[in-house]
Each structure stands twice: as C-alpha cells, then as structure tokens.
Image: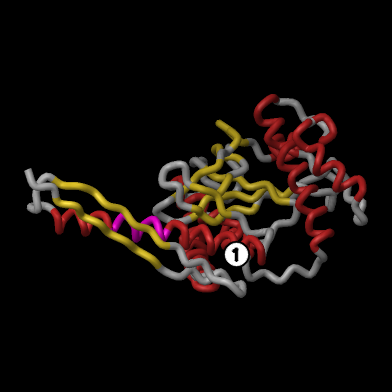
Amino acid sequence: MKITEVSASFSGVIATGSYQNIKPSYSMSVELDSEDNAQKVFKSMRDMLRNIFKEEEQQAIVERIQKEREDLRFLPSPKTGKLLPSVTSIINYDADFFVSPQELTQYCSQGNCIDARVKHFVKTGEWVAAKDIKDLWTDIVILTKGSLKLPLDVGDFPGFIEKYPLNALEVGERFFNDELGFTGETDLMGIPNKIKDALDIPTVFDVKRTPSKISNGLQLSAYCRNYGFKQGIIIPLSDKTGQGFSKPVIYNEESLNGYFKMFQSKQKNFKKRYSL
C-alpha cells in the first residue's frame, strides 16, 4: 500500500505596537492511504493553521489594548473561546474622563457597593450595609482610604421599589453574545407593576449612581437586544436626594432601537480603532 504524506504550513507577522513584532509559524503533516483526498486534506490543514494564526493575532491585539487601557475588558466566550469586549468598554473607549484614575477607581468602588447591596436585597430580602457583604472588602478599603471620602452606603432601594413596584425581580447574569460580538452583565430583570410610562413587560433594569441619558441608553439597548426585551429602565440610587432615589428613567422599544443603531456605530469605530 502506498502511503502519501501531506504537509501544510502557515506563517505571518503580528504587529504588537512595540519595537518587536510577533512572527508565529505553524506546520502540520498527516499520512494518507491514497492520493485521492490529498488536495482536500491539504486545504483543510491550511484553513486550520490559518485559524490558529487568527486566534493568536486576536490575543496579541487584546493584550496590547489592555496595556494601553486597563479599563477596557475582554472576556472569553464559553462557547467559542473568542475574546469579547464588554458593552461598557465599547461605549466608553473614547470617553474623556475629567477625573484622575485614582478618583475614577473610587467612584467605581462606590458603584460596586451600590450594586452589591441591591443584588443582596433581591436575593435575600435584607437591606444590609456594605460592610456586611464580604465580597466588598477591596472596595471598602478603596473608599475608606480614598481622597474623596465617598460614603459606603448610598441610596434606598427598598424605598424605590415601595414607590415603584417591580414583579418577578431577579439578579441578572453575565451573558456572551458571539453573534453580536459583545459581553455584558445586567443588574436586574423583572416586570414593572403599573409604573407611569412603563409597560408591564419583561424589562432590563440597571442601577446607576448618576444617570446619563445617552450612555445609559446605549448600554440598555445592547442588553435588551441580547435578551430580546423591548424595554429598559434605569434605577437612580444616590445620596443626592433625601429619599435616596429618583424616579426611574424609561427607555421604550422605539428609543432602544435608535440607541442600538448608535451602539453598533460605536462598536464599528471601536473595532476600527483597535484593529479588531
């Protein structure tokens, strides 16, 4: 019996943005019992090697981005292994923050405390202080030692849902949408209960310390598109009002569709900016 050996190789250059580029090279070979399928096998091997190169190129690009911008997040899809940018990274990649990185970290930690307290309440029915949630230890240290002296316990979520009732409320989970090319983590999902200007339909809720109409609309549009929801609502919790909350900000189907078009444009520019 005649044995036919088929070999394939692939090499390329990956620009890292540093002084030295990566030059990966791959090869593989296989033995066949006949020459009948040699060409088909060769093409399959070349495609496989090309895909391996593309994966390494993607990884190198993401590593470069994260060196430039520590605030941009990429997470691997459990389904494909592809690194997906978070919705907030896409939205904020070109934002000009008028605060120092140190102050921004403190604001983020306060937001983490608000988010964790709300989710703890939804899960347990108990509205506890941030110090009583063990996962917040790092954020508590950042806030207590930070220059801004931001308070740990901000907002009154039980008071909010007493005034604006919500049904079937549950804590959201991280999702990965390979088709749309992003990942995100919703705060809450549920159904409004006769809230003015809101429909009693499945809704994505996001808790914000300081609402921002456009960026919040972009974020909710991406989250709602992932779940197929037609309504998103921002829950403002802060210490800016005596009651600890403000009225909900409602995004209906029409506005979500408009914001999602804006989000897709932003996503396109994000990919172009970082050569993704």
Is 102 part of what is drawn in magenta? no
Asked where in the image residue 192 lies, by quadrant, the reply is top right
* Kind of residue at disc 1: Arg
Query: Which residue sits at x=54%, y=73%?
Result: 273
Q: Horizontal placement of 52 versus 95: left or right?
A: left
Q: Which residues are magenta?
A: 46-54
Query: Which residue sits at x=51%, y=48%?
Result: 76
The residue identified by callout 1 is 64
Asked where in the image residue 193 lies, by quadrant, the reply is top right
Pick whichever, 127 or 72, lies toward us.
72
Q: Main secondary structure of the magenta part?
A: helix
Residue 251: in sight, yes or no?
Answer: no
x, y percentage for residue 202? 50, 41
Query: Which residue sits at x=82%, y=36%?
Result: 130
Pick whichever, 248 or 42, lies toward us.
42
Q: Crowding at label 1, few (<14), some or many (≥20) Cα neighbours within 10 Å?
A: some
Which quadrant of the figure contains the N terminus? top left
Task: Check the image and report above or below for 268 versus 191.
Answer: below
